[in-house]
Amino acid sequence: MKVTTTREITTKECPWLRQDIPAGSTFFEYLGRTYGAVSATGIAVSVSEGKRPFFEIPANAVKKGGGE
């Protein structure tokens, strides 16, 4: 499922990110195994649907669905 960020996500908030993520960025929810690498307040996402690598972003910073 496609997700869109509803606000900017900074490397200060999420130090594991390589760069800040602007509001309105789109990713795909990653539904594969994460082996406990994603916190209870996060969501695993990837750039390509169903493909690794995945990374965590705050669940309160995305909306699910919409788009193409």
Image: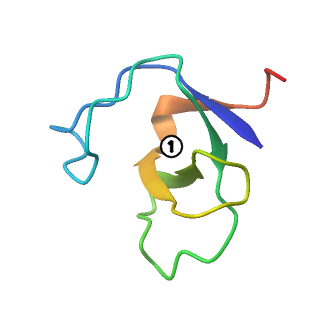
**Residue 44: % across, % down:** 54, 56
**Residue 8: % across, % down:** 36, 21
Q: Residue furthest right?
A: 68
Could you tell whether 45 is left or right of 14 in the image? right
Of residues 39 and 33, the one drawn nearer to the viewer in this rendering: 33
**21 over 2 or under it: above or below:** above
The crowding category of the residue bearing disc 1, from other C-alpha atoms within 10 Å (few below 14, some 14 to 19, many at least 20), is some
**32 over 16 or under it: above or below:** below
**How many numbered marks have been drawn onto this rendered protein structure?**
1
Q: How is the image coloured?
A: rainbow
Residue sitting at 64 percent across and 58 percent down?
30
Residue sitting at 19 percent across and 49 percent down?
15
**17 over 53 or under it: above or below:** above
Residue sitting at 28 percent across and 47 percent down?
17
**60 over 15 or under it: above or below:** above
Amino acid type at circle 1 is Ala
Per the image, label 1 sits on a secondary structure element best described as helix
Q: Quadrant of residue 38?
A: bottom left
Q: Residue furthest bottom?
A: 35
Could you tell whether 8 is left or right of 4 in the image? left
Q: Quadrant of the N terminus?
A: top right
Q: Quadrant of residue 56?
A: bottom left
Residue on which disc 1 sits: 59
Residue sitting at 52 percent across and 24 percent down?
25
Could you tell whether 42 is left or right of 8 in the image? right
**Residue 20: % across, % down:** 28, 30
Q: Quadrant of the C terminus?
A: top right
